[in-house]
Image (cartoon, grey):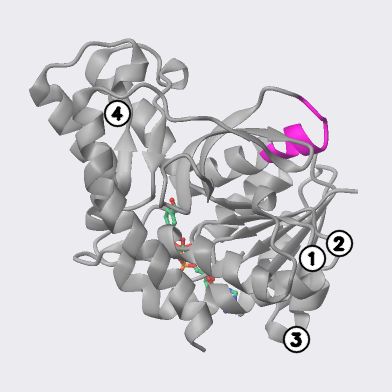
Amino acid sequence: MVKVSVLGAAGGIGQPLSLLLKANPLVTELALFDIVNTPGVAADLSHINTPATVKGYVGNEQLEAALTGSHIIVIPAGVPRKPGMTRDDLFNINAGIVKNLATGAAKWAPKAFICVISNPVNSTVPIVAEVLKQHGVFDPKRLFGVTTLDIVRASTFVAEAKGGKAPNTIVPVLGGHSGVTIVPVLSATGHTFSQEELDALTKRIQYGGDEVVKAKDGAGSATLSMAFAGARFANSLLEASVTKKTGITECTYVKSDVVPGVEYFATVVEFGVNGVHKVHPLPTLSAHEQKLLDAAIPELKNNIAKGIEFVNKA
Ligand code: NAI
């Protein structure tokens, strides 16, 4: 039995993500939790003839039932950006939402893999970790910040600029998931780039989310591409933990000692039956990428400290 719980399942990301998870034959039970509308989303998805049974849960009093027995918890709950906002501007609202959901996970599904989509990911992952620590159930192998959309975007943008098929264009993206903390390793693609191309592509990968926020013009941020990325991430975890396939890797934001003094960091991670099997060391960086990493570190440290402080000040 493989239960996947989506927290924030009625939202812009939550609905298409739930659809893609319903289409995944490895999932046998889909629990859709939100503060509104999940009975309708669940009824709709439940008519699809794939193995997963689907149930909707609404409101905090149903969080326990949504989480109990969960193998993977995916969290896209919270408010998205509007034009002119940074991901950090979301902190005040989303930190509390994520803290509450993490408390539920600590109590009712302490062994589940937790995949955090809610922004600012650089801070919400440390928030979840601190809550799990307070309950004595933190396992760093089981907590992930989902940065897959940065990887998906990077391969699309590089293939567009340099030719080749996007799915075969692999671009590791290190660091975190906002602005300057996003460090694309374009040197790993095998392409050669002029300095102008490097600057333009790096900026586009770092601020790709802004293109969507601007185009949606007040109606939110990336939802469909994020659902694709989130479903890919969950599937990689399922393949490693359920079908026990080896050698599966994703870039993801996890507790790490890859960069001394930076407690959480996105890099290539190999999955195993228990979640993180191996955090890969930093790849060889070009001088351009080393500069990007140097610029990312102070911001990342601040974002992490803010998340940790949010939980521990209370
Ligand atoms: P949305 O507003 O469409 O959906 C959010 C959902 O969360 C709503 O259905 C809302 O009812 C629900 N929600 C609010 N409070 C809740 C609570 N206490 N418990 C459970 N559910 C609750 O927003 P959207 O576009 O789906 O984005 C969700 C989050 O994902 C945002 O924080 C956004 O910034 C983030 N995001 C992350 C990305 C990433 O790459 N990691 C990419 C794009 C968005």
Residue 51 disc label: none
Image point 39% across, 25% down: which residue?
Answer: 171
Q: Is residue 212 left or right of residue 288?
A: right
Whichever of callouts 4 and 3 sits on the residue coming sooner in the sequence is 3
Please report contact status of discs 4 and 3: CB closer than 8 Å, yes or no.
Answer: no
Please report contact status of discs 1 and 2: CB closer than 8 Å, yes or no.
Answer: yes
Of residues 47 and 206, the one nearer the viewer is: 206
Q: Residue furthest left?
A: 196
Kind of residue indicated by mark 1: Ala
The residues bearing labels 1 and 2 have C-alpha atoms spaced at a distance of 6 Å
Of residues 28 and 113, the one nearer the viewer is: 113
Q: Residue furthest right?
A: 1
| Residue 294 appears in the figure | yes
Kind of residue indicated by mark 3: Glu
Q: Secondary structure at mark 3?
A: helix
The residues bearing labels 1 and 4 have C-alpha atoms spaced at a distance of 38 Å
The residues bearing labels 2 and 3 have C-alpha atoms spaced at a distance of 16 Å
Please report contact status of discs 1 and 4: CB closer than 8 Å, yes or no.
Answer: no
Q: Secondary structure at mark 1?
A: loop
Please report contact status of discs 2 and 4: CB closer than 8 Å, yes or no.
Answer: no
In the figure, residue 274 lies in which quadrant? top right
Task: Report which residue position mark 1 lands on.
Answer: 109
Whichever of callouts 1 and 2 sits on the residue coming sooner in the sequence is 2
Q: Is 43 drawn above or below residue 312 in the view shown?
A: above
Kind of residue indicated by mark 2: Gly
Image point 78% across, 70% down: which residue?
Answer: 66
Task: Report which residue position mark 3 lands on.
Answer: 61
Residue 69 disc label: 2
Which of discs 2 and 3 lies nearer the camera? The answer is 2
Image point 46% across, 16% down: which residue?
Answer: 168
Stretch in magenta: 237-245
Whichever of callouts 1 and 4 sits on the residue coming sooner in the sequence is 1
